[in-house]
Image: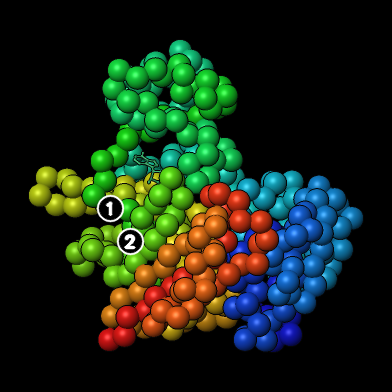
Amino acid sequence: MLKPGATIGILGGGQLARMLALAAAPLGLRCHVYSPEKNSCAFDVVHTGTCASYEDESALAHFAGAVDVITYEFENVPAKTAAFLARRKPVLPDPKVLETTQDRLIEKNFISGLKIATAPYASVHSATQLTEAVKAVGLPAVLKTRQLGYDGKGQAKIVKGGDAIAAWRSVKNAPAILEGFIDFEREVSVVAARAHDGTVECFEVTENEHRDHILKLSRVPAKVTPTLAREARQVATRISKAFDYVGVLAVEMFVVRKGRQRTVLVNEIAPRVHNSGHWTIDGASVSQFEQHVRAIAHWPLAKPVRLGRRVEMVNLIGNEVDDAARWLTVTGASVHIYGKGDARPGRKMGHVTRVWPE
Ligand code: AMP
């Protein structure tokens, strides 16, 4: 159990690390951010920062020596880096989780192994195999690279009568999976925290809208029945138990019709705090960031309570951050600007949370 004054090491220096550090401070915990990019926005808010590559063993050893526990804000932490650090200090969530979540095929097999539904999928590592996969999965479908894909990168849709080989070329012949294209009713996610003693606290089911594959809007309550909400939370809970997880994870799901009922299919697991949980900073009694800090510090989790009748989070993407001044005057709105500098198209520059009172 960490004592106030202890230091959390965070791998990665983006907005998630920044918000983790901002949540640790009121609990009396310090953060040390490790990032290869000197302009990392998390450096602005922490006690100590190390700017070095993830392969720099002397910098990593120094970092491990300076912190009490290590966590990460992104799932693509190189396996070697995680193993090197884990020999020196506790790394939470356990890096073995990364082996599953860094590879879409291993992740899908893991989820299916738990008897949790996903879109139909098949492994693809050659053009010939893609033809087989199309037969097995059907069209329309999405070809996704197994590794390093996010926000729609490394993905190609194949429509009925479409050119599968062009899709294969567009993912640059990288090992991939073909997923059936789901005609979902809505997209939801569950952000869950799991403590070292196995206690799980889920935030309520969040409804998400994407634009150009990037999350644009999250809202609670989601338009789902209590039964479906229970099912979604159970899915996230079962996944966190299967990993023996410590920290916060997010499970993204599609809501689909199944006869007269509705059910969920898991799309993706994020072994970290997640954009769809940002509403909890201003819209809940405890944020996803504080829950993560509590979990990795081996402190008790809070029981989250939503503040307000409804809460909505809007991402400020690219130059939408220029609207921040307008948002500052909106009743019930809280503005978060990440301090990232260049507002490139598609870059998450900030977000706004709106809380509608009871
Ligand atoms: P991903 O990179 O897998 O998180 O996908 C990003 C977004 O693309 C999802 O949130 C969905 O909106 C859409 N998408 C991904 N996979 C599928 C699928 N199999 N069927 C329909 N839409 C999908």
Q: Residues within 10 Å of mark 1 (few under 14, many from 20)?
A: some
In the picture, the disc for residue 109 is: none
Above or below: residue 129 compared with residue 261? above
- 223 vs 22, left or right, is left
The residue singled out by tag 1 in the image is 186
Q: Residue at (57%, 38%) from the top-left corner?
A: 147
> Which amino acid is tagged 1?
Arg
The residue singled out by tag 2 in the image is 207
The numbered mark, 2 or 1, whose residue comes first in the sequence reads 1
Task: Tell me residue 333's x, y (percent).
Answer: 43, 78
- Image quarter hosting the N terminus: bottom right
Element type at mark 1: strand
Q: Toward which corner of the image does residue 190 lie, by quadrant?
A: bottom left
Q: How is the image coloured?
A: rainbow
Q: Residue at (22%, 62%) from the top-left corner?
A: 224
Answer with the quadrant where ligand 1 appears in the image: top left
- Image quarter hosting the C terminus: bottom left
Residue in front for this viewpoint, 211 or 200:
211
Q: Residue furthest right?
A: 58
Q: Residue at (74%, 85%) from the top-left corner?
A: 5
Residue in front for this viewpoint, 194 or 63:
63
